[in-house]
Image (spheres, rainbow, N blue to C red):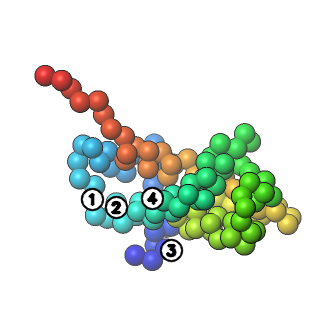
């Protein structure tokens, strides 16, 4: 599946409706796994996971790339590459304002990923 098709499929996920039951309850459908796997893959990189954490926890709900870059011992182009991967995976939205780009987490996809990983407490007999 191409990155463009994955992004289109992710945009169709409704934040109020879970994509499927948690993986602890039943097997995830192949089509759903194909749509969500790139998001998990993007978060599998330590730098991207830290970036995602900084973006999602930004006090104003968004953060400027100018505030992200200094937090790492990496070049600006490397940070841009990681941010592009998060965008391609459908995890963040970006908006250019003048010379800076501001990033926001997409709460719907984050809820979908969290719901998929939810583990219920087993009922004891």
Does label 2 or label 3 sit earlier along the sequence? 3
The residue at the far top in this view is 125
Q: Name the secondary structure under disc 4.
A: helix
In front: label 4 or label 1: 4
Residue contact between numbered discs 2 and 1, judged by CB atoms under 8 Å: yes
Residue under numbered circle 2: 33
Element type at marker 3?
helix
Q: Which mark is residue 40?
A: 4
At numbered mark 2, what does the secondary structure look like: helix, strand or loop? helix
Using the image, tell me which numbered label, if any, was put on residue 4: 3
Between tags 2 and 3, which lies in front? 2
Location of mark 1 (residue): 29
Residue at 75% from the left image edge and 68% from the top image edge: 76
Q: Whole-percent x and y of residue 59? A: 72, 39
Query: What residue sits 46% from the left and 63% below the top?
Result: 41
Q: Is residue 90 visible?
A: no
User: In terms of sequence position, does the residue under pointer 3 or pointer 4 come before the other?
Assistant: 3
Q: Residues within 10 Å of mark 2 (few under 14, many from 20)?
A: few
Measure the C-alpha gap from mark 2 to mark 1.
Answer: 6 Å
Q: Residue 16 in the image: x percent, y percent?
A: 45, 42
């Amino acid at each position: 599946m191409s990155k463009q098709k994955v992004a289109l499929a992710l945009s169709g996920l409704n934040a109020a409706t879970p994509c499927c039951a948690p993986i602890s309850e039943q097997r995830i459908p192949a089509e759903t796994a194909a749509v969500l796997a790139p998001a998990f893959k993007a978060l599998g990189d330590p730098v991207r996971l830290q970036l995602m954490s900084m973006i999602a926890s930004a006090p104003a709900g968004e953060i400027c790339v100018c505030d992200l870059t200094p937090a790492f011992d990496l070049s600006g182009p490397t940070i841009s590459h990681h941010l592009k991967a998060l965008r391609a995976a459908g995890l963040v939205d970006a908006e250019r304002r003048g010379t800076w780009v501001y990033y926001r987490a997409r709460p719907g996809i984050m809820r979908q990923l969290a719901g998929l990983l939810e583990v219920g407490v087993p009922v004891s007999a």
